[in-house]
Image (cartoon, rainbow, N blue to C red):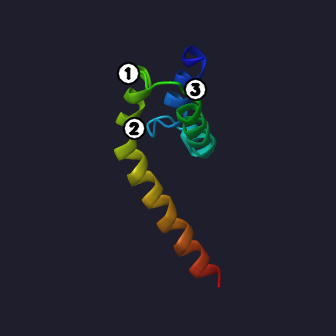
Amino acid sequence: MYDLLLPVIRYSTDVHQSAHIYLCEDALDLWLATLQCSPSVAPSLLDLYSHMPALFGWCTAALLCATVNRVNSS
């Protein structure tokens, strides 16, 4: 299972990949489902957490942009 899922999650949550803008939300859902269904936490699954600091930064920036756009359209 991990051989298929982890590369997809890794690519989709990598903020250095231009496609992450379109894939990240679904990849985070897939990551959560993978964690919930895993009988144990494998080291390869834990390696994905290296993407978290950049994702927090990206999510914060995206939220700020959405807020500014919403205020400007009001």
Q: Quadrant of the C terminus?
A: bottom right
Q: Earlier along the polypeptide chain: callout 3 or callout 2? A: 3
Taking depth in this image into account, of 21 and 6 the one nearest to the observer is: 6
Callout in the foreground (1, 3): 1
Kind of residue at badge 2: His
Name which residue type carries label 1.
Answer: Pro
Q: Quadrant of the N terminus?
A: top right
Label 3 Cα neighbours within 10 Å, binned few <14 / some 14-19 / many ≥20: some
Q: Tag 2's secondary structure? A: helix
Q: Is residue 61 left or right of residue 30?
A: left
Dot 3 falls on a residue whose secondary structure is helix
- In this figure, which residue is indicated by the disc labeled 3? 8
Say which of 73 and 12 sits in front. 12
User: Horizontal and vertical percent for residue 58?
Assistant: 44, 52
- The residue carrying mark 1 is 43
The reply to whether callout 2 and callout 1 are in contact (CB within 8 Å) is no
Q: Which mark is residue 51?
A: 2
